[in-house]
Image (tube, rainbow, N blue to C red):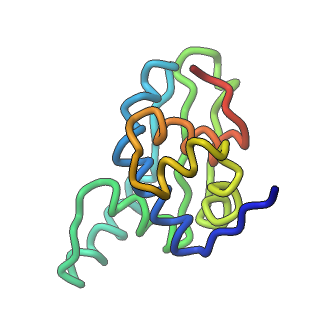
Amino acid sequence: MTIVLTHTESETYFYNALCNGLGEMRYYGLSLDVDGKAYKKSKAKLEKENKSTCYEDVFMQLLRDGGTLTMVDDECDGEYTRSITIKDVHDRVAMTPLSHLMDMINEHDDAITGDVILQSVFYEEVIFG
């Protein structure tokens, strides 16, 4: 079965995953890193447009502005460090295991759903948890 999502749907589900699942990544020895200068530029852009500047909003704007998000492996000498772009979000959210993707689509998502979507986007599979 092939799941096809629009860019807007992929971005919405990834954004929700950042909100719900990002904290779970620390249990795997991972942390999210961004270029500080790019973060400030994207945040300023949102402020100028009178939009929310919570960090998930800034992360999404940073991706839309052509930047990257990097999941840093803090425990295994960088073995699981990966960077993504907005194209990866568009291409990989649909790769999320169907049960979790449907939980997100049907708004029955939780931290586990977010965790699985984040892993699907950063690693193209679920490898932790």
Residue pushed farthest right?
1
In this view, the residue farthest toward the left is 50
Against 39, is 83 above or below? Answer: above
View extreme (bottom): residue: 49
45 or 114: nearer the viewer: 114
Task: Answer with the quarter of the image where residue 44 lies.
Answer: bottom left
Q: Residue at x 55, y 38 (%)?
A: 71
**The C terminus sits in image quarter:** top right
Looking at this view, name the residue that lies furthest to the top. 75
Q: Nearer the viewer, residue 60 or 109?
A: 109
Figure disc tally: 0
Going by the image, does 111 lie left or right of 76? Answer: left
Q: Residue at x 31, y 77 (%)?
A: 45
Residue 125 as seen in the image, left or right of residue 32? right
- The picture places residue 27, in percent across and down from the top left corner, at 44, 19
Q: Position of residue 33 (x, y in %)?
A: 46, 42
Q: Quadrant of the N terminus?
A: bottom right
Residue 63 location (% of width, % of height): 51, 65
* Residue shown at 45% from the left, 53% from the top: 35
Q: Is residue 80 left or right of residue 35?
A: right
Q: Residue 62 location, x and y as percent?
A: 44, 65
Where is 19 relative to 110, above or below?
below
- Residue 27 or 101: which is nearer the viewer? 101
* Residue at the image position 67 percent from the left and 57 percent from the top: 94
* Residue 85: quadrant of the picture: bottom right
